[in-house]
Amino acid sequence: MRLAFVGPPGVGKGTQAKLLAESRGMPHISTGDILREAVKRESPIGIEAKGFIEKGAFVPDGVMIGIIRERFEKGDCREGYILDGFPRTIPQAEALEIFLDGIALPLECVYVFDCPDDFIVERITGRRTCSNSGCQAIFHVRFQPPKVEGVCDKCGEALEQRSDDSPGPVQQRLEKYHATTERIIPFYEERGLVRRLDGAGTTGEVFAQVRSAGASL
Ligand code: AP5
Ligand code: MG
């Protein structure tokens, strides 16, 4: 399965990608997770990306394409992969297509998660993320609470709120999604790759759709 997950901030892309990656033993490539790890390490990319992320703006396309190319060099994507949060712009989609064709691993399907903006705000404001950049497990104070408040079930590190999950950056991220990222959906529709999923249900309900969409791949 060679997949890309597209959807508004907080719709549940990361939650669903982690579930599918665990059940199918395939790599989950989240550009947001890669950037947050780089910010914590204070690497050159992290230093450049920090200001964009905190404002809810996009990191420049050239940086993002470089990150993806480097990630594929790991060599673990031959049996499949899940791209989460990449591509988000037409130039990213075009560069990705050329790159993946070049390594004979083109996308097989693009899952588009739809959800009203009202749901998004509740999901994002209640999200808690593991502060261990190698884990970054996702919780929610109401919908997916950890066993012990404030502590990651998976690795035991403290949970935190993402710096871009405050109202200003969330609004900006939603606007960027509607104004820019949604434009990549017709790009993939022209190629017959789009599957639309209803992201408004419970995590289990959405995962049932993810599994059935993948059954034919
Ligand atoms: P990124 O980390 O990709 O953020 P995003 O796209 O805004 O999406 P989120 O991670 O916020 O949400 P999600 O859909 O993964 O939802 P989650 O599963 O966590 O990117 C962050 C930033 O990095 C960008 O703003 C940008 O600056 C930069 N960046 C990244 N990629 C880039 C690119 N390609 N180009 C340029 N810049 C880039 O779920 C959210 C919450 O809801 C959780 O608490 C979860 O427990 C809960 N939840 C999930 N599903 C459900 C459900 N069905 N019911 C109830 N609650 C649910
Ligand atoms: Mg995410």
Image: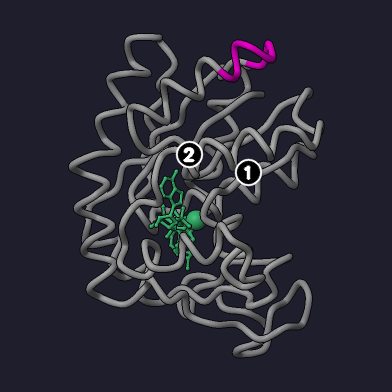
- The quadrant where residue 120 appears: bottom left
Q: Mark 2 and mark 1: span between their CA atoms?
A: 9 Å
Name the residue type under label 1. Answer: Ile
Give how far across and how far down residue 150 sits, in percent.
60, 89
* Quadrant assignment for the N terminus: top right
Q: Secondary structure at mark 2?
A: loop
Is 13 situated above or below 92?
below
Q: Residue at x 33, y 15 (%)?
A: 189
Picture quarter with the C terminus: top right
**Residue highlighted by disc 2:** 86
Magenta span of residues: 99-105
Residue 145 x/y as whole percent? 56, 78
Whether disc 1's CB lies below 8 Å from ligand 1 is answered: no
Tell me if mark 1 has few (under 14), some (14-19) or many (20+) residues whose alpha carbon lies within 10 angstroms of its own: many
Look at 66% across and 70% down and name the residue there: 41
User: Who is closer to the viewer here, 102 or 139?
Assistant: 102
Furthest residue toward front:
44
Placement of 179 over or under 58, stated as above or below: above
Mark 2 vs ligand 1: CB below 8 Å: yes
- Is 103 one of the magenta-colored residues? yes
Up the image or down, 61 lies above or below 97; here it is: below
N-terminal label among 2 and 1: 1
Instruction: List x then y, in percent, for residue 38.
Output: 61, 63
Residue located 30% across and 67% down the image? 55
Q: Amino acid at mark 2?
A: Phe
Q: Which mark is residue 29?
A: 1
> Was residue 217 drawn as part of the magenta stretch in this picture?
no
Tags 2 and 1 in contact by the CB under 8 Å rule? Answer: yes
Q: Is residue 7 left or right of residue 143?
A: left
Where disc 1 sits, the SS reads strand
Q: Quadrant of residue 148?
A: bottom right
